[in-house]
Image (cartoon, rainbow, N blue to C red):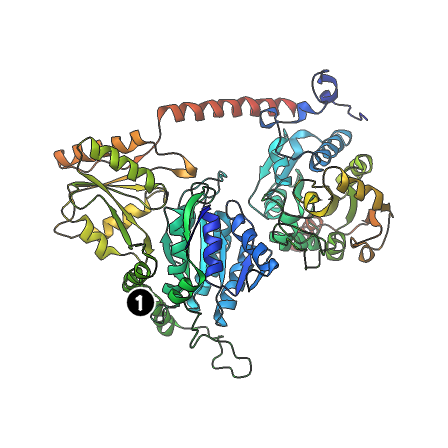
Amino acid sequence: MTVLTSQAAMTAGDAGHPLDPELREGRIPHIWCPGCGIGSVMQAFLEAVDTFQLERNRLAVVSGIGCTGRVAGYLKADSFHTTHGRPIPFATGLKLARPELHVNVLSGDGDLAAIGGNHLIHAARRNIDLNVVCINNFNYGMTGGQVGPTTPLGAKTTTSPFGCHEHPFNLVDLVASCGAVYVARWLSMDVRRLRRSIEESFSKTGFTFIEVLAPCPVNFGRRNQLDEAAQGRMLVERSEIRNGADTREVAIPDEGPIVCGKFVDHERPSYLQLLEGLRARLQEHST
Amino acid sequence: MKRRLLTGNGAAAWAARLAGVDYVPAFPITPQTEIIESLANWIDRGEMPGRLVTLESEHSMLTAAGAAAATGVRVFSATSSQGLLYAMEMLYTVSGWRAPFVLVNVSRGLSSPITLEPDHNDILAARDSGFLQIHCATCQEVLDSVLLAYRLGEDNRVRLPVLVNMDGFYLSFTREPVEVPEAEAVAAFLPSFQAGEIRFRASAPESQAVAVLGGGPYSYFRYETHLAARIAIQVYDELADVFEQSFGRRHAAVECYRCEDADYLFVMIGSFATKARAAVDSLREAGWSIGLLRPRLFRPFPEAQVRRLLAGRRAVAVIDQNLSFGAGGVLYAELAAALYGEKAAPPVLASFVGGLGGRDIPPEEFYEIARLIRDAAERGETPPPRLLYTEAELRETRKLQAIAKVERAGLGAKS
């Protein structure tokens, strides 16, 4: 599986994981439960950073609060663990103040789509140069598994013990409709496609959004007859790759195929490009 | 009446259940989440009437709570720390609507840096919001205070929302035996909400709340809210009597522990005051004339009672579990303001700050504080404010900083 070309791969001894040098070892062991999908997404992200040969002194990783929020603390990178819902405004400030940085947001569905939902849609609308990876585990995992904006209808959580009676978001459609230039959805188990997709998103100019569906066996799965490996297996069995599918038709259904793939990949002037354009025009005008 | 082993969160949930709340807007946050989980479970099971909805943030949650209360139904909600701060805009707004409801805050230190453990900077940030504030030290008090808070806020002379505060972890996750009163007894103490003028009638609107006011009428409504909060001191005292008659437990606005004859006093709010209480017992055994004053009601601030209870003491140590950067302890400033110009004010009022982010205040520190204020009283001069921190703690922090420095150097080398 190794695609590493950097020192990271070469220095890893038999005892360690090849990615150990990329992590703040003092923070390990991590807090994620057995069977959680976040770790593989973090690995895919690190591999993408490596294969894309992203310079470390340009790499910034921002996350919010929640299980995925912990990613920022584990990576040996310039990383920021913001308050709940605020990674996108934080990343926006970072990107506009230091446009040379490659700013990534890795956060959860609860953080990005509930309390931070407003920021998500406006960042996509502005097409601000950020790469967002949203790990969707269908509930608020860190606080123990409460109903959230992606919880499927009928799913049990600690605050919907007899089934959720709210409609969930179709996140990829939400973000695509707001104007993101790159929108994809993968399973956390599909690490190869996920890594390639993250890598591809790095090459885009503008707002990119990758939703990663991740099992949460302990807080979500256990309450929905999907404990241990069952939720992961269910996701794998139901997933179907349809690149270029219309995002309006890929809401995660109660039954039947869960559509993954790259849905949007087009060009649209980014916030920074428009700003530069405006500046250039004004400059021209004044001289 | 049933005795149950309940956490502070459990006690808050039981109080909301017994109060027969109609509506619970909710949003999870550690260490409060157990409250809304318990209520969600009871409501979905049909054991409790009412509706619960998990909103997308505390800001929406407070907005929904205020709106529902303004229609004349009984509303409950709970939050903590950053959540309370995120809702802050609406705290100020809904108190002006004069629609009473109860919001439980489970105290947790604020960012940055991030912590999960308690101190009072979150709740004290709501000090001037128009919400009344009751601070609890035990799980029993949490349950009782929520019931009291509904009576207090819904009283015709008051009509304000009320915050009931407990410390995260120390109360929220600690089980204590709690007397859970029978539903009938609660119904007798706390009848259903008599909304009176507070009602929403789509067919017959009485006013249009769309005015943007100039200073004159604006000040009028702000003063009205202030005066209602002031009246709440007297209303609280009346209710504490009624509560005692109903349930046999007294929750005075200001709790006084072994302070009748005390020359020296600790003053603290919240559950850490139970540590001060234990220290008072030990010091009493060693021959000290010392006691503890614990304001439960913080807004409105019962300064007349505080003045009376502090009068004639030789020295008083105020231990703040909060920090107003650049000023010091908030409770200390409030007490100093209350005592200024009082003839019988204690000559020494000393300030200590500790317990931030759940940092323990061990017995030895209370003993040291007692010694400091005794010596100060003898010398006749007030010692400068102290931040409670040990050399061992400083060494630990320095170690962490050294590790961080090495880590940073490593990162720099990679780039």
Image location (x, y in percent) of residue B253? 29, 55
Image location (x, y in percent) of residue A134? 70, 45
Residue at the disc numbered 1: B227
Is A45 placed left or right of B40 in the picture? Answer: right
Is A123 placed left or right of A1 in the picture? Answer: left
Q: Is mark 1 on a helix, strand or loop?
A: helix
Q: Give me the residue at 30% from left, 58% from top.
A: B244
Image location (x, y in percent) of residue A261? 83, 46
Position of the C terminus of chain B, as image quadrant, is top right
Residue A132: in sight, yes or no?
no
Position of the N terminus of chain B, as image quadrant, is bottom left
Host chain of mark 1: B
Is B28 placed left or right of A105 in the picture? Answer: left
Image location (x, y in percent) of residue B412? 60, 25
Which residue is outermost to the bottom? B204
Question: Between A96 and A5, which is closer to the camera in this rendering?
Answer: A5
Quadrant of residue B134 in the image?
A: bottom left
Where A200 sits versus B19, above or below? above
Quadrant of residue A81 in the image?
A: top right
Q: Give me the residue at 61% from left, 33% from top.
A: A31
Specify the amino acid type for callout 1: Leu
